[in-house]
Image (spheres, rainbow, N blue to C red):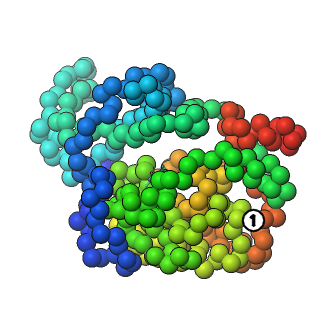
């Protein structure tokens, strides 16, 4: 049991003066450190409207509700066990017997509150599009030629995309500044590497980072041309070096990829630990960065001309547009 417990990451202790790139100063901008500052409980008045989706196996629930009459989405997720907490968990908990039979028994272990935390993500105020994003839905695979991208997808995403404000806040050092793991400030090939919203940074087993490019205007895979090769190669090389230095994880343990379609149309690259089934790492959505680089080396216009396949949820307006055009 202990051997399968997740390995601990003390990310904060390792931030100081070790990263190879320029680091922003720790900003006192209201962001939390790894242990988190105690903050006002904005969820105390949360009124649940409905459960958007949940998974007993993954121990996660997505809830739609209201905070002060405005829509909000709350994600609650039980966190993995950490090996270094086991001793305290065994010695400091209450045990309630549920049943016993021969050599078998089951209990409810009531852990001290600090060992029983729930990772909580709040989107507030949430748009209708956020609510839909988290709602369990049937999906359909779309076949998008280069032409359909221009005539159907591009006009749709120009009108219907999520705000990129959170991305610009990161790039400008206005949010999450103290979480940045590595930054190359170059305006053409530079990027910021930091923990993804989904990762609590407590263990490397579910490592999830994102590299956000400084260049603006590259929406997605579809916009990539051979002129972007230096940018992509820079992210691949320096991103992997930063992960090795910070988390002691070699490139052979990383899955580095882009989503198509992404939710946010400002180019970013996902870094997840191999073996961790990160949401969206399946073949229908994830494109390995190494493959993208090779495809562009073979054909500078690969991503303008090739048919790309991606899943679209039943209630996604983009699916409606493909249906209207009778392309699905
Ligand atoms: P995507 O492929 O555009 O969309 O990836 P997806 O959410 O459908 O995968 C965007 C990535 O950025 C996701 O992995 C998000 O979890 C992550 N992300 C989203 N937001 C709003 C934030 C944020 O505010 N901070 C950080 N650090 N990551 C975010």
The reply to whether residue 254 is visible in this rendering is: no
Taking the spot 47% from the left edge, 21% from the top edge, the residue there is 49
Tag 1: Cα neighbours inside 10 Å, few (<14), some, or many (≥20)? many
Q: Where 217 sits versus 103, above or below?
A: below
Is residue 84 or residue 224 the one in the foreground? 224
Is residue 150 or residue 172 the one in the foreground? 172
- The response on whether ligand 1 sits within 8 Å of label 1 is no
Residue that extends furthest to the right in the rendered view of this protein: 326
Query: Residue 161: image x %, image y %?
Result: 63, 47
Could you tell whether 15 is left or right of 317 in the image? left
Toward which corner of the image does residue 110 lie, by quadrant? top left
Taking the spot 59% from the left edge, 73% from the top edge, the residue there is 232
Is residue 46 or residue 3 the one in the foreground? 46
The reply to whether residue 176 is visible in this rendering is: yes
For the image, the number of numbered tags is: 1
Is residue 99 or residue 312 the one in the foreground? 312
Taking the spot 18% from the left edge, 23% from the top edge, the residue there is 96
Query: Residue 85: image x %, image y %?
Result: 20, 48
Taking the spot 37% from the left edge, 77% from the top edge, the residue there is 22
Query: Residue 177: image x %, image y %?
Result: 35, 62
Q: Where 173 sits versus 201, above or below?
A: below
Could you tell whether 286 is left or right of 191 in the image? right
Q: Quadrant of the C terminus?
A: top right
Query: Residue 262: image x %, image y %?
Result: 61, 52
Residue that extends furthest to the left in the rendered view of this protein: 91
Q: Where 176 sits versus 53, above or below?
A: below
Could you tell whether 140 is left or right of 259 in the image? right
Q: Where 24 sits versus 115, above or below?
A: below
Q: Which residue is mark 1?
A: 303
Provide the secondary structure element on which disc 1 rests: helix
Toward which corner of the image does residue 150 lie, by quadrant? bottom right
């Amino acid at each position: 049991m202990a051997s399968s417990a997740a390995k601990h990451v003390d990310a904060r202790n390792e931030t100081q003066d070790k990263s190879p790139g320029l680091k922003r100063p720790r900003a006192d901008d209201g962001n939390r450190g790894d242990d988190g500052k105690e903050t006002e409980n904005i969820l105390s008045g949360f009124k649940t409207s409905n459960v958007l989706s949940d998974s007993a196996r993954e121990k996660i629930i997505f809830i739609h509700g209201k905070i002060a009459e405005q829509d909000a989405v709350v994600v609650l997720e039980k966190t993995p066990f950490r090996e270094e907490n086991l001793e305290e968990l065994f010695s400091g908990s209450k045990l309630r017997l549920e049943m016993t039979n021969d050599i078998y028994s089951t209990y409810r272990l009531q852990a001290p509150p600090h060992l029983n935390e729930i990772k909580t993500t709040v989107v507030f105020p949430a748009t209708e599009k956020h609510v839909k994003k988290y709602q369990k839905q049937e999906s359909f695979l779309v076949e998008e030629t280069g032409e359909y991208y221009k005539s159907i997808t591009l006009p749709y995403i120009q009108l219907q995309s999520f705000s990129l404000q959170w991305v610009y806040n990161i790039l400008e050092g206005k949010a999450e500044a103290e979480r940045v793991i590595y930054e190359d400030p170059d305006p053409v090939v530079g990027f910021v590497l930091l923990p993804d919203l989904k990762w609590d940074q407590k263990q490397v087993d579910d490592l999830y980072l994102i590299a956000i490019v400084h260049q603006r205007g590259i929406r997605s895979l579809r916009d990539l041309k051979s002129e972007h090769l230096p940018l992509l190669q820079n992210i691949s090389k320096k991103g992997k070096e930063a992960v090795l230095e910070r988390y002691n994880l070699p490139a052979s343990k990383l899955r580095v990829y882009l989503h198509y379609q992404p939710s946010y149309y400002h180019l970013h690259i996902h870094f997840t630990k191999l073996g961790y089934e990160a949401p969206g790492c399946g073949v229908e959505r994830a494109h390995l960065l190494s493959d993208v680089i090779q495809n562009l080396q073979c054909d500078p216009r690969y991503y303008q001309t090739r048919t790309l396949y991606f899943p679209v949820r039943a209630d996604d307006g983009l699916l409606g547009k493909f249906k209207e055009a009778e392309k699905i």
